[in-house]
Amino acid sequence: MNPHFPLALLLATAAASHPTRAANLPPEVSEVLSQALAVPAARIVPLGWAPHMPEGCVLRQAVLGSAVTGSGRLPVKLYGQGCMGWGWVHFEVWAPTAFTTRPVRAGERLQPALAVEDREIRSGHVGIMPPPGALAARDLPRGSVLQASDVAGATTTSGEAVKVIVTTGSLAIELQGRAIACGVGRTCALLPSGRHVEGHWEDGHLLVDVP
């Protein structure tokens, strides 16, 4: 078994089609999109930007109200000095994607039957990079994009809504976050603020201890 399975897959990534056009975004909008990105190892390719702000209003801050889990078109709140507006941003999300190169039986090791290529990620269809030695949870046909439910023992999918309990001292705050991948043996989530946190599962929620 190769202990560096994810890295080995990435190094063997096959060439795939890529977006050929891109739009320029204000840095404030690019930053908020990057902070909201809940797909591991992904990148955002902006395709269109349509702002609606009062004349003379200079953009100083952008706010996005949801996590980015795939390609799409989202509204962005825009704020200036004593003024505000909104805009629509259209974008694609691309990420290394693991898929089967041949049929795989339930209980079989996934590593020998997988390849990785850069693919566009559709919202709600985020694949995963399995840990070394991972086994198939069910029979998979050739060409299947690997999902969390395809891996034995997997519990969440990147972008899936999860309950996060943040504790600091005697204070506990409950938040709704999004599960994100952050490495083998680790459990992480993206909070509504855009902050990435790491914790452990306890009674169906992610417990995060902040010193």
Image: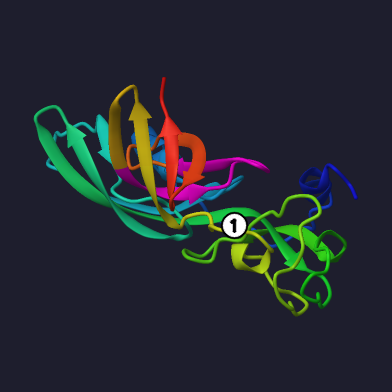
147 relative to 44 in the view: left or right? right
Residue marked by disc 1: 20
Establish if 23 lies above or below 103. above
Render colour scheme: rainbow
Q: Residue at x 41, y 19 (%)?
A: 211
Establish if 166 lies above or below 109. above
Q: Which residues are magenta?
A: 175-189
Q: Residue at x 30, y 45 (%)?
A: 64
Magenta segment includes 177: yes
Q: Residue at x 68, y 43 (%)?
A: 184
Question: Neighbour class for label 1 at 10 Å: few (<14), some, many (≥20)?
Answer: few
144 relative to 33 in the view: left or right? right
Q: Main secondary structure of the magenta part?
A: strand
Q: Residue at x 16, y 44 (%)?
A: 85
- Taking depth in this image into account, of 169 and 14 the one nearest to the observer is 169
Establish if 107 lies above or below 132. below
114 relative to 30 in the view: left or right? right
Q: Amino acid at mark 1?
A: Thr
Magenta segment includes 176: yes
Establish if 161 lies above or below 166. below
- Taking depth in this image into account, of 161 and 28 the one nearest to the observer is 161
- The answer to which quarter of the image holds residue 192 is top left
Picture coordinates of residue 183, whole percent (x, y): 65, 41
Residue 124 appearing in the image: yes
Picture coordinates of residue 191, whole percent (x, y): 38, 41
